[in-house]
Image: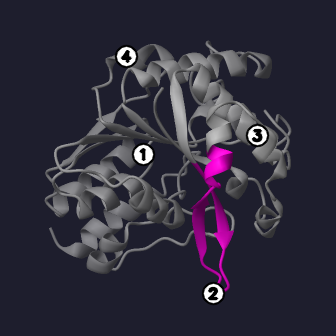
Amino acid sequence: MSMKPLKTELQQLYGDASKHSAYQNIPDFVSAELGYTETIDESWRGDRPRLTYLYEARKPAAGEIWMDFGANTGFFTLSLAKTHPQTRFIAVEANPNHAAFIRRVADYFQMGNVGVIQSAVGIEDLPSLPKVDFMLHLNVLHHAGHDFDKHAVACIEDFGEYAQRYLKLLRGVARGLFFQMGSNWGGDKSRPLVGLYEDAEKLRLFATWLRHAGWRPVKAAYPHRGGDGRIAYHDLATLACAQLAENSGMALEMHSWESLDQFPGEFYRRPLFICEHA
């Protein structure tokens, strides 16, 4: 198949007008080969800074199995699989068009280390997932009760208990976790789980849910914009991370959150966690 028909097919799969379409960047190697890219306003949200941080914080190892849960169009799955051919990657994605996007790219580039599970996986289905060494679970959980598991979390007051049950089940699937979630239930800013600017409380709340589910947050990171305008994630200070793991808020209250004010909206105020089993 020539590149032009594939590019057209990928464009159609990417922009299918679903709720989470036109969401992720196109992997750089795909753009270089096919001349295909999509414009994402990375001042509001972006994928590349998180990928760069992940490369620095937890590189895939040969022989490991990684899972990208809620993979969308596969920016993380495909980017990681391209640079780490000795690691197996499994993309879990409910949207059939987005799952097909990942498959088509993997097939074209002969990426035999990429597998796709096209399925809407709810809380009851988590134990049936294959066991993996590390899981990416990025900005999925706060959509529970809206996009999935409507029966399991009927109101915002039920969300905390549900989140802890969900995260505990994830512990049975993965040995490590790269985790991020939004602070608005269902992405609705009129239904906040925690206030937009309550950054210390947000970090403490999400870390508490993780700890109660049997996870130990070993890193927590936030974005900073450098003098050249580039966005990069940096870990909280070692003391803050240690106290976070021990449920102490002293270092969090002392931390300056003003650097987050340079970013519009809520996305860049979401902490990034790397967790291991407690």
What residue is pinned by disc 1?
71
Tell me the residue at 58%/69% (across/down). Answer: 232
Residue 121 locus on image (x, y percent): 43, 25
Please tell me which of labels 4 and 2 falls first in the chain: 4
Residue 201 locus on image (x, y percent): 80, 38
Residues at circles 1 and 3 in contact by the CB criterion of under 8 Å: no
Residues at circles 4 and 2 in contact by the CB criterion of under 8 Å: no
Q: Is residue 246 above or below residue 35?
A: above
Q: Secondary structure at mark 3?
A: helix
Residue 124 locus on image (x, y percent): 46, 13
Please tell me which of labels 3 and 2 falls first in the chain: 3
The 10 Å Cα crowd at callout 2, few under 14, some 14 to 19, many 20 or more, is few
Q: Secondary structure at mark 4?
A: helix
For residue 222: magenta? yes
Task: Choose between 267 and 232: the one closer to the eye.
Answer: 232
Is 172 on the left-hand or right-hand side of 62? right
Amino acid identity at mark 4: Pro
* Residue 243 figure quarter: top right
In whole angstroms, how far apart are the C-alphas of marks 1 and 4?
A: 18 Å
Q: Is residue 246 above or below residue 159?
A: below
Q: Secondary structure at mark 2?
A: loop
* Residue 116 figure quarter: top left
Is 30 on the left-hand or right-hand side of 275? left
In whole angstroms, how far apart are the C-alphas of marks 3 and 2?
A: 29 Å
What stretch of residues is rendered in magenta?
A: 220-241
Amino acid identity at mark 3: Lys
Q: Is residue 227 above or below residue 127?
A: below
What residue is pinned by disc 3?
202
* Circle on res. 127: 4
Amino acid identity at mark 2: Asp
